[in-house]
């Protein structure tokens, strides 16, 4: 799903879907204009979805260190 400009709204919608999707193993959201709010939503879904093995987010618009910290905590769990 790289380069589709889904932004925060799209990332938040994907986060809701990813919470209950047990078959999703790889998700690449590179260059999608996702900022902290969308990244935070995805991080929360990663906390409950243990099937995702690969998650890529390069080339998005992280605005503060908070977004990076939230993702780091989700990955560590």
Image: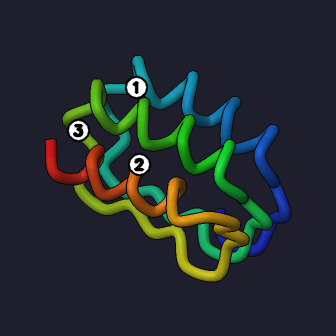
Q: Name the quarter where the N terminus is drawn.
A: bottom right
Identify the element where label 2 is drawn: helix
Q: Which residue is label 1 attached to?
A: 21
Identify the element where label 1 is drawn: loop
Q: CA distance from mark 1 to mark 3?
A: 8 Å
Residue, far bottom: 59
Q: Residue at x 81, y 38 (%)?
A: 9
Up the image or down, 77 lies above or below 22; here it is below
Q: Which residue is label 2 attached to?
A: 70
Q: Position of residue 65 (x, y in %)?
A: 52, 65
Q: Position of residue 28 (x, y in %)?
A: 51, 65
Callout 1–callout 3 Cβ contact below 8 Å: yes
Q: Name the quarter where the C terminus is drawn.
A: top left
Callout 2–callout 3 Cβ contact below 8 Å: no
Up the image or down, 69 lies above or below 65; here it is above
N-term-proximal mark, 2 vs 3: 3
N-term-proximal mark, 1 vs 2: 1
Is residue 69 left or right of 65 when viewed as pictured? left
Q: Which residue is label 3 attached to?
A: 51
Q: Nearer the viewer, residue 5 or 21?
A: 5
């Amino acid at each position: 799903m790289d380069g589709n400009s889904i932004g925060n709204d799209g990332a938040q919608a994907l986060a809701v879907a990813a919470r209950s999707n047990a078959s999703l193993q790889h998700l690449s959201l590179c260059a999608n204009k996702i900022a902290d709010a969308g990244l935070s939503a995805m991080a929360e879904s990663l906390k409950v979805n243990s099937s995702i093995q690969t998650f890529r987010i390069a080339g998005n618009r992280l605005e503060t260190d908070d977004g990076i910290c939230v993702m780091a905590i989700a990955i560590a769990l």
